[in-house]
Amino acid sequence: MIEIEVQNETHQSQSRLRFAAVPRIGEGIRLREPDGMWASYDVIDVWYQKAEFGDVWMPYLHVRITPGEGAAGEPEAAQFASFDAGFGAYAGEVEPFKI
């Protein structure tokens, strides 16, 4: 297991997590949100820094929430409000026929 420091751009936080392999730039990972729910994040940067001990290089990740996953703290109804507003309402649509 590799311990990696993850810097979360969405929540402006840092945490140390264990991975079996170092994720590459552009890959997606699942992380737990502050509210306890899981969300998808994109790896936007990977870099290595020399550790304070020995000749070891420690990996670091910079992540951001995946577009379309929704902004943190935004209610689900608000995420889809713009989509639902135009659903089924096309210009020039004929009114339903009453019998």
Image (cartoon, rainbow, N blue to C red):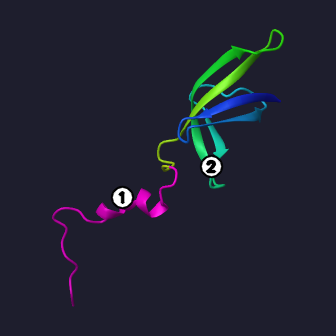
Indicate whether residue 26 is drawn in magenta.
Answer: no
- Find numbered disc 2 in the image and state the secondary structure of the residue it sits on: loop
**Residue found 47% across the figure and 47% down from its top:** 68
Above/below status of 23 relative to 87: above
**Residue found 70% across the figure and 22% down from its top:** 59
User: Which quadrant would residue 46 be assigned to in this image?
Assistant: top right
The local crowd at label 2, few if under 14, some if 14 to 19, many if 20 or more residues have their Cα within 10 Å, is some
Q: Where is residue 32 drawn, in percent x and y?
A: 66, 48
Total count of labels: 2
**Residue found 36% across the figure and 58% down from its top:** 83
- Find numbered disc 1 in the image and state the secondary structure of the residue it sits on: helix
Q: Farthest residue toward the front?
A: 52
Query: Would residue 90 appear left or right of 27 to someone viewing this image?
Result: left
- As measured in the structure, the alpha-carbon distance from the residue carrying label 1 to the one carrying label 2 is 24 Å
Q: Nearer the viewer, residue 39 or 26?
A: 39
- Disc 1 or 2, which lies upstream in sequence? 2
Residue under numbered circle 1: 83
Q: Amino acid at mark 1?
A: Phe
Q: Farthest residue toward the bottom?
A: 99
Dominant secondary structure of the residues highlighted in magenta in the image:
loop
Q: Where is residue 96 drawn, in percent x and y?
A: 22, 79
Residue 33 is labelled as 2
Q: Where is residue 13 drawn, in percent x and y?
A: 61, 38
Q: Give the residues in magenta.
A: 72-99
Q: Amino acid at mark 2?
A: Glu
User: For the residues carrying marks 1 and 2, which lies nearer the camera in this image?
Assistant: 2
